Image (cartoon, rainbow, N blue to C red):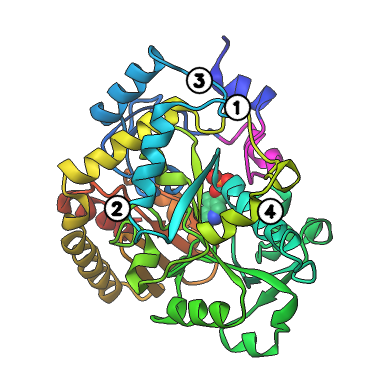
Amino acid sequence: MTDPVRADKAHCWHPFTPQEAWCDPAHEPLMIVRAEGVWLWDSEGRKYLDGNSSIWTNIHGHCRPEIAEAIAKQSTTLDHSSYLGLSHPLASELAEKLVSFFPPNTLERVFFSDNGSTSIEVALKMSLQSRMQTGQQKRSRFLAFNNAYHGDTLGAASLGGVKRFFSRFRNLGFETELLSSMASLSNVNPTTVTAVVIEPLIQGVNEMRPWPEGMLRELREWTSNHGIHLILDEVMTGFGRTGTMFACQRENVIPDFLCLAKGLTGGTIPLAATLTTHSIYETFLGGAENAFYYGHSYTANPIGCAAALASFKIFETDKVLESMPAKIAYLAASLEKLRSKRDDIIDIRQCGLIAGVEFKKNLGGEITLAARNQGLLSRNILDTVVLMPPLCVSPEEIDFMVAALAEA
Ligand SMILES: *Cc1c(COP(=O)(O)O)cnc(C)c1O
């Protein structure tokens, strides 16, 4: 191979990226070549704290030996086989593990797919098809929230509330009404709605904006009262990020669909799961015409399942959830100190180990780039710099991260 940067600029196309600026000769993209714990190294040997958990995926730090070993072992035992017409034990074990976080007879069925968008796509199609199979065809619309982000496949994108990403394709997907708040539910005709979709506790792409406490509970009550499905998009909030294994547990809410991806394998291999209830599942019984005709070639990939099971083991051996309250409080205190020192910070928002530091207008990009030179890699969403380290982050590493931002 020639120079990797040259090959990148000649042949690669990056997500969410204005390619002309990327390929400009003056732009030197970072080539990440190695990772360990919360640290990433570039091709020049420079070291960075992964302040964005590699786009919100990493949970226990990079290259954890337990996950690497599980992946290696599975790669030489059963790398892949079809989940269509066949099964394998790791998928069974993982499904059992996932439902074990919820009371019996609630979320008890697991449908595997590959990423966050497909986990949402699955829930949307299941919700709609279950209506068709129970004589409720008129329930054909979805409700989602302004500035929501649920993924980029066409169905998931039709729920997206971020105009600059989704307005082009808005008319091609599912019929969706966007809500500005809980109060706007009173203007909705609930009889034509099949499901409400929400990122529980905190909206990620919407500059890390937490919902008011109790809102999820309220939404659960409203949807239950109107016979509407509640789809929770925990693609970002799942796997301990907010302090509990799943965000919905913070408000004792059990949805009709729970969508999981990003952190499911600890941030190593693409794998997703959509959990649902028996009452949804049973509407798909009764013969071939009622089956859910949906799937992907790599559905329930055994290597991904092995990584996910290894990640759950680390939650136990490292007592990860038990360690969270102290880390969350430490991050909050560090950010409070940062706020008191700077007058260019407009707001600091935090939910668990997810934080967004909002700077004055048009400073976000510049500060994120400057933070790189201080050894902190993250991304800004407009003027909000995301601080979302892996859950294994130590107090010293939190100090490093916040000091790097302050310096930037
Ligand atoms: C990342 C994300 C998605 C999409 O997941 P992909 O794996 O990127 O398709 C959906 N919803 C939320 C809340 C996310 O953060």
| Identity of the residue drawn at 64% across and 68% down | 195
Among numbered discs 2 and 1, the one appearing first in the sequence: 1
Mark 4 Cα within 10 Å, few/some/many (few <14, many 20+)? some
CA gap between label 2 and label 1 equals 52 Å
Q: Amino acid at mark 3?
A: His
Residue reaching furthest right?
Answer: 171
Query: Which residue carries the number 2 mark?
Result: 404
In front here: 43 or 121?
121
Asked whether the beta carbons under mark 3 and mark 2 sit within 8 Å of each other, the answer is no
Q: Does the Cβ of the disc 1 residue fall within 8 Å of ligand 1?
A: no
Compared with residue 407, is residue 178 higher up or lower down, i.e. above or below?
below
Front label number (2 vs 1): 1
Image coordinates of residue 30 in percent, x first then y, are 47, 33
Q: Position of residue 252 (x, y in %)?
A: 35, 72
In whole angstroms, how far apart are the C-alphas of marks 1 and 3? Answer: 14 Å
Q: Main secondary structure of the magenta part?
A: loop
Residue 26 on the magenta span = yes
Indicate which disc, 3 or 2, sits on the residue closer to the N terminus: 3
Asked if residue 362 lies left or right of residue 240, the reply is right
- How far apart marks 2 and 4 lie (CA) works out to 44 Å
Q: Which mark is residue 80?
A: 3
For marks 1 and 3, the one nearer the N-term is 3
Which residue position holds label 1?
85
Q: Position of residue 366 (x, y in %)?
A: 49, 56
* Camera-nearest label, 2 or 4: 4
Q: Secondary structure at mark 1?
A: loop
Q: Give the labeled residue for mark 4.
A: 125
Amino acid beneath label 2: Ala
